[in-house]
Amino acid sequence: MSPRSRLSRIVRALAGLSSRALFGLALAWFVTWTAAIYVVLDTVVADEHQEGLATIAGSLMTAFGALFAFLTAFVITIEWNQHRDVEHTIGLEADACVRLAWASEAPGSDGDAVRADLSAYLHSVVEDEWPTLSQGSEGCTATHDGMRALQRRVRLIAADPAVAHSVTADLIKAADHMAVTRADRLNAAGHDLPTPLFLLAFLAGVVLTLNAVAVSLHLERGYAIVIGGLVLLIAMDLALLLALSTPFTGGLQVHARPLARVLADLEADQYGPRSTSP
């Protein structure tokens, strides 16, 4: 296994932590780093040279601050948009299920059997496949089998010449849309935060705190509150970045509520009765 793949696994594992754990971990690391670098610089740099070091570090603060702000804003925006896209995909998948359920009410469409297959498929999505999405985009064999059975049922109905063409078109369109949105959901489950981008943002935060410590060396101890605020902000930014990076894990994960709602309506027979036999 290459070092880069190990690093990617570490980033993904961190992203899977709860929001509170992520923030606490980031804050603990930066507090420890800031305190350690303060002690080291205060010990190594002589008092008469600390003001000169502060002047040099101060001239770089704007550049490093802008770099960190740009990087985190850029990555957070990308990850937030990705997160919203996944939520939209889940909504589209639920919409396709609703369209199929209503289309199955048409005369001659064997609607009770279609709704039974749809209910079994959604059960498998919510109970079997959804927990696996945190591990990647492999999906679940049982859910795939449920999708295949549903697609076969719809196409058998569509092949019946006694069924109206408009009905078969609605059934096939809804079933195809379900398959496509499921594939999009599985693809989204394989999304990872680009490790180089995260490392660059992390290192920018490290260097920014280093410069802040260098600037504060010759100042009164009361100015430590300014550095404390900077450390808090950096930790919050990086924790949010990680929390958004994996849509199916962590504290900000996408939930299966739209699909579970359709399943509940199916089980309540709101779209018509379901067949009790396979």
Image (cartoon, helix red, strand yellow):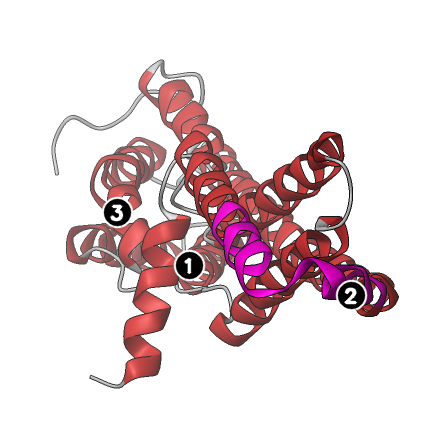
**Residue tagged by mark 2?**
57
Q: Is residue 190 above or below residue 2?
A: above
Please state which of residues 235 and 165 is positioned toward the viewer in this rendering: 235
Q: Secondary structure at mark 3?
A: helix
For mark 2, does the 10 Å Cα neighbourhood hold few (<14), some (14 to 19), or many (20 or more) residues?
Answer: many
For mark 1, does the 10 Å Cα neighbourhood hold few (<14), some (14 to 19), or many (20 or more) residues?
Answer: some
Q: What separation in Å lies between label 3 and label 2 (alpha carbons)?
A: 52 Å
Quadrant in which the C terminus is drawn: top left
Q: Secondary structure at mark 2?
A: helix
- Verify whether residue 276 appears in magenta: no
Of pointers 2 and 1, the one earlier in the residue sequence: 2
Residue ranking furthest to the left? 277
**Residue tagged by mark 3?**
129
Q: Which residues are magenta?
A: 34-55
Percent from the top left, x then y, of residue 220?
Answer: 76, 36
Viewer-nearest of labels 3 and 1? Answer: 3
Of pointers 3 and 1, the one earlier in the residue sequence: 3
Q: What separation in Å lies between label 2 and label 1 (alpha carbons)?
A: 56 Å
Percent from the top left, x then y, of residue 242?
Answer: 50, 51
Three-letter code for the amino acid on which mark 1 is drawn: Ala
- Verify whether residue 45 appears in magenta: yes
**Which of the 4 image quadrants contains residue 187?**
bottom left
Three-letter code for the amino acid on which mark 2 is drawn: Ala
**Residue drawn 56% across and 40% down?**
91
Percent from the top left, x then y, of residue 154?
Answer: 35, 53
Q: Main secondary structure of the magenta part?
A: helix
**Which of the 4 image quadrants contains residue 7?**
bottom left
Of pointers 3 and 2, the one earlier in the residue sequence: 2
Three-letter code for the amino acid on which mark 3 is drawn: Glu
Q: Is residue 217 left or right of residue 194?
A: right
